[in-house]
Image: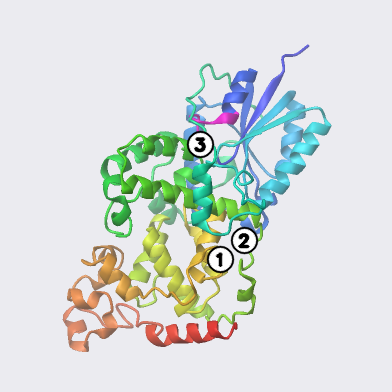
Amino acid sequence: MPEKVSILWFRQDLRLEDNPALCAAVQSGRFYPVYILDDESAGPWEMGNASRVWLNGSLEKLDRSLEGKLSLYRGNAEKILPELAARLGADCVYWNRCYEPWRIKRDTSIKQTLTDTNIDVKSFNGSLLWEPWEVLKKDSAPYKVFTPYYRACRASTLPAKPVPVPKNITALKDDKSLSLQGLSLLPREKVWVERVCANWAMGEKVAHIALEVFIENGLARYKKGRDYPSEKSVSRLSPHLHFGEVSPNFVLDLILKQDNSENRDHFCSELAWREFSYYLLYHFPKLSDENFQSKFDGFSWFGSEKELKAWQQGMTGVPIVDAGMRELWQTGYMHNRVRMIVASFLTKNLGVHWREGAKWFWDTLVDADLASNSASWQWVAGSGADAAPYFRIFNPVTQSKRFDEGADYICTYVPELAKLPARYIFAPWEASVEVLHSAGIELGRDYPKVITCLKSSREKALLTYKGLG
């Protein structure tokens, strides 16, 4: 009788350390580590281009960690995984759970198919600190506001302690699997791909280094410094967390070992915001497509396709907005404070539906995460859970003066304004023609004229909101 083997299905957990599904697979004996690029099941949430660039690098690093034993496939996982289990003679399939609605539906179907053929399925929590169904109100309803949710989390069972990389990993390789190139992950825009890759390194080892660098250099000023885009006070761990190159358990455990401070506590609360986003998506699976607050279904979005394009290209004439959008295009990332500014400008000053912004971020962010992306866009737009009130409209000029006082961030991504006197860099339309010419700038030629009046567009947004009743 042939020796039984198992399958370890990697998904958003591309690491060896603190990977409960991997530990279980190793304990069972020999196993096939596999990854399936399943665009078919994802539907409209097929992975964006920036995420594909990251995934390509992350899979390469994971395969090295597994000594070349990672087997890759492309297609519908509902079809591939059962066929693979039958062909390889697997008696069990292990995976860490995912929480996107389409993945839950797919995984439920796969589990049923496998168990019907006497193949065990064992799933684990490898992505969250608390399972979404574990933290509920006294009436068993889900929380809709972050603060009481976080309070309940802290009062509940402590997150699991991270577990080390298991010893004696006896991984097997399927000789019928694809090569990494066979997945065709990289987009055709080679220059753009190279530019994004020049700003990042992927993989588990890099994720651990990034965490250590943040603790050493950024954590001490995190609470205040995280609002200043030119400072290095943020962790930049979001893509590493999204792809599971490091677990939130591992991050939290290491952070809590640091000296007790408001900076440490604030970082922990930001980790909890990530949890809250997943929590909302799990309990309200239409969060990515529909207004969380149904009253916004009657909101008359007034933005145009032309304005959306200008925003996407970083050509709005509002320097802090353009800097953020250019940072996004050039690096696959945008500082969190600037994300809020550009999102407010799009939804409130330009009157473009939040879904259009969410779609663009989905395609261009290396940390594009359905839960965080959907919850954050709805939060800024005012239609989400625990949302910023619609009448809270970020003034991009005020924001840039406050959080980019020296215009260092703006000048990094909008260098054509660097010769302007500092007082005009935040709002070049306020400069006289003579001042502009002395800096070698003609608005409309060297830098766009502002596409909307901030004051009147704000008033229009508020008037439209009042119409909801």
Quadrant of res 321: bottom left
In the image, farthest residue toward the right: 116
Question: The C terminus is located in which quarter?
Answer: bottom right
Q: Is 164 situated left or right of 131 in this image?
A: left
Which label belongs to residue 158?
3
Residue designated by label 2: 287
Q: CA distance from mark 2 to mark 3?
A: 27 Å
Residue 371 at x, y = what percent?
56, 54
Q: Determine whether 344 is above or below 159 in the image.
A: below
Q: Please tell me which residue is depicted at 29% across the width and 78% down the height of the picture.
A: 446
- Residue placed most toward the observer, 373 or 459: 459
- Do the CB atoms of the residues marked 2 and 1 lie less than 8 Å apart? yes
| Amino acid bearing label 3 | Leu
Q: Which residues are magenta?
A: 13-21
* Mark closest to the chain's N terminus, 3 or 1: 3
Which label belongs to residue 384?
1
